[in-house]
Amino acid sequence: MPGATALPVLRLAWQPDRAELADALRVLLRLRRRRRAGALLLGGLAVAAGSWATGQLLLPWLALVVLLLALVVLPVHRLAAQMSWRRDPRLRTEHTAEVVPGEGLSLTIGDVASAYRWSAFSGVLETDAQYLLTLPRGRRTSVLPLPKRAAAPGDADALRAVLAAALGEPVRAR
């Protein structure tokens, strides 16, 4: 397209932060919980209907309590982040990424390098601190976090533009 400016290749470098790991796990747990919520709701309603049909008054209340506990997730993402942080020393090593418009990105963590084509990702989520590139893994989803702070000050808008061009406009994660 005439007059269009090409998006630059971006080089990101960052030292991971445990709070960003917890943030990514929180979003990931919410993605997974949405899928399970419908099944839990139907199961809880089936138990309540069955106990009501048999005349058991305690079972509907028990089913309701179990259902509410199943839908309310405690802040397990913080505990999971803390355990992962302690267990995996690679999480504490410097990460670098090269974001190439139209091709994909390559990620280096310590001495391990991985390359991803944009087609490997199903979308991008945005939190206050980072972009989470979603990777479908069968019935489960995983995320590849790119902290916003990893981009040079002038490259923050370019990073968002590259991600939007490759994966669609980032969806705000709650």
Image (cartoon, grey):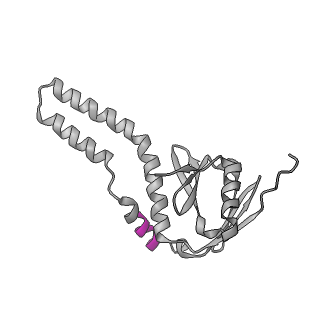
Residue 171 vs 25, above or below: the answer is: above
Q: How many marks?
A: 0
**Residue 113 painted magenta:** no
Q: How far from the left and from the top, in percent, is residue 128? A: 51, 60
Is any part of residue 12 visible from this angle? Answer: no
Residue at the location (21% across, 27% down)? Answer: 50
Residue at the location (63% across, 74% down)? Answer: 110
Q: How far from the left and from the top, in percent, is residue 133? A: 60, 54
**Magenta span covers which residues?**
80-87
Residue 51 vs 134, above or below: the answer is: above
Q: How far from the left and from the top, in percent, is residue 127? A: 52, 57
| Magenta portion: prevailing SS class | helix
Q: In the drawing, does residue 167 fall left or right of residue 38?
A: right
Q: In the drawing, does residue 52 fall left or right of residue 156?
A: left
Residue 85 vs 135, above or below: the answer is: below
Q: How far from the left and from the top, in percent, is residue 82? A: 41, 69
Front-most of residues 35 and 111 = 35
**Residue 82 painted magenta:** yes
Can you name the residue that lies furthest to the front here?
Answer: 3
